[in-house]
């Protein structure tokens, strides 16, 4: 019951945290942090810039709620902050994605083909999913190249989505990109969960539903204790959107019942 009540509060009663997010950005600026995207941080790693020592790598996973996504983007533009926005096939907004890219931030793919494949074919055996990875990778490549063509921009980094199916199978969507040839054919230089990428980060902070809000610590505490931070946020955790949350909750319930 406590879990259900917490979910209801998170989805329908939580006050907006947009102001808190803006204060966080301002605190980062005052503390001398460069606030940038996954792509830009990856490029700085490759270039081995010795003069840039304090980073906040902003990553937004757009699981739902394009309305709040737009608000996050507008806040970042006001303060000259760059970030990465990763869109699912269900949340694509090419107009917004092009605006993000034109500003200098990053818009790319939040992929979930393993979970989607498992749900479509009612597969609950991780070994069976792994045996069909070549087929799943072909689907990923088709989706990725189609999205890139429609967007009209080269996507160099991507980020795996975490679905309830992945948790039950104990199988991450990122296994798709364990194939070096696939990465080369798609021109993907970095996956946001790549160990080689994350080893350059001192702490990885992800948002959570209330009352926790962040794990393992708050970004403000992170700013005072660390120099290289990767911060993952989701629009759903920043502001409630009754229509989108209800739509997503019903969809999630139906998927769980039919899988």
Image: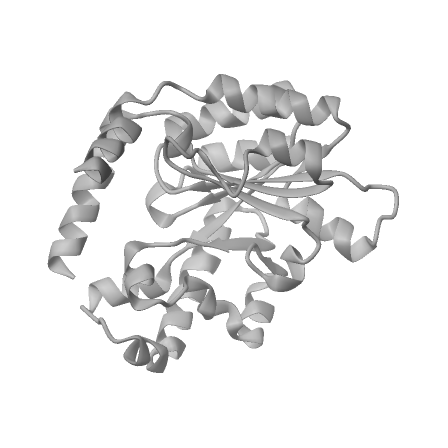
On the rendered structure, is 142 left or right of 36? left
Name the foreground residue: 108 vs 115. Answer: 115
Q: How many marks?
A: 0
Scheme by which the image is coloured: one colour
Residue 6 vs residue 125, the one in the foreground: 6
Across and down, in percent, residue 122 comes to 18, 68
Residue ID at (58%, 33%): 219
Above or below 26: residue 212: below
Point out the image quarter for the C terminus: bottom left
Q: Which residue is drawn at 65% across and 29% down?
A: 81
Which x, y percent locates residue 205?
55, 43
User: In the displayed structure, would residue 124 be above or below residue 84?
Assistant: below
Query: Along the horizontal axis of the image, is 84 left or right of 214?
Result: right
Q: Is 97 rendered above or below residue 136? A: above
Residue sitting at x 37%, y 31%: 210
**Outermost residue toward the left?**
257
Which image quadrant: the N terminus? top left
**Residue 10 at x, y = what percent?**
30, 30
Place residue 246 in its image quadrant: top left
Seen as rendered, the residue at the extreme right is: 51
Q: In which quarter of the image is residue 146?
A: bottom left
Point out residue 257 in the picture as x, y percentages from the top left corner. 11, 55
Q: In this view, does 47 lie to the left or right of 98?
A: right
**Residue 244 shows in this picture:** yes
Q: Quadrant of residue 91?
A: top left
**Extreme residue in the front direction:** 2
Q: Is residue 80 visible?
A: no
Q: In the displayed structure, would residue 235 be above or below residue 165? A: above
């Amino acid at each position: 019951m406590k879990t259900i009540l917490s979910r209801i509060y998170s989805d329908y009663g939580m006050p907006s945290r947009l102001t808190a997010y803006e204060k966080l950005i301002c605190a980062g600026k005052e503390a001398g942090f460069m606030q940038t995207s996954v792509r830009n941080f990856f490029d700085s790693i490759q270039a081995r810039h010795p003069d840039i020592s304090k980073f906040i790598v902003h990553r937004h996973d757009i699981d739902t709620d394009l309305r709040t996504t737009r608000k996050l983007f507008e806040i970042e533009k006001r303060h000259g902050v760059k970030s990465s926005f990763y869109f699912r096939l269900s949340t694509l907004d090419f107009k917004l994605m092009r605006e993000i890219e034109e500003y200098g931030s990053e818009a790319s793919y939040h992929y979930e083909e393993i979970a989607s494949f498992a749900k479509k074919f009612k597969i609950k055996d991780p070994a069976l999913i792994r045996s069909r990875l070549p087929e799943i990778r072909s689907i990923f490549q088709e989706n990725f190249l189609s999205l890139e063509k429609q967007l009209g921009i080269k996507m160099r980094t991507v980020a795996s989505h975490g679905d309830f199916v992945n948790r039950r199978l104990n199988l991450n969507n990122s296994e798709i990109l364990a194939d070096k040839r696939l990465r080369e054919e798609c021109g993907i230089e970095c996956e946001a969960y790549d160990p080689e990428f994350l080893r350059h980060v001192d702490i990885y902070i992800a948002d959570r539903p209330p009352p926790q809000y962040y794990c393992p610590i708050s970004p403000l505490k992170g700013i005072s204790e660390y120099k290289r931070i990767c911060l993952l946020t989701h629009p759903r955790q920043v502001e409630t959107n009754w229509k989108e949350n209800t739509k997503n909750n019903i969809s999630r319930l139906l998927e769980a019942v039919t899988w």
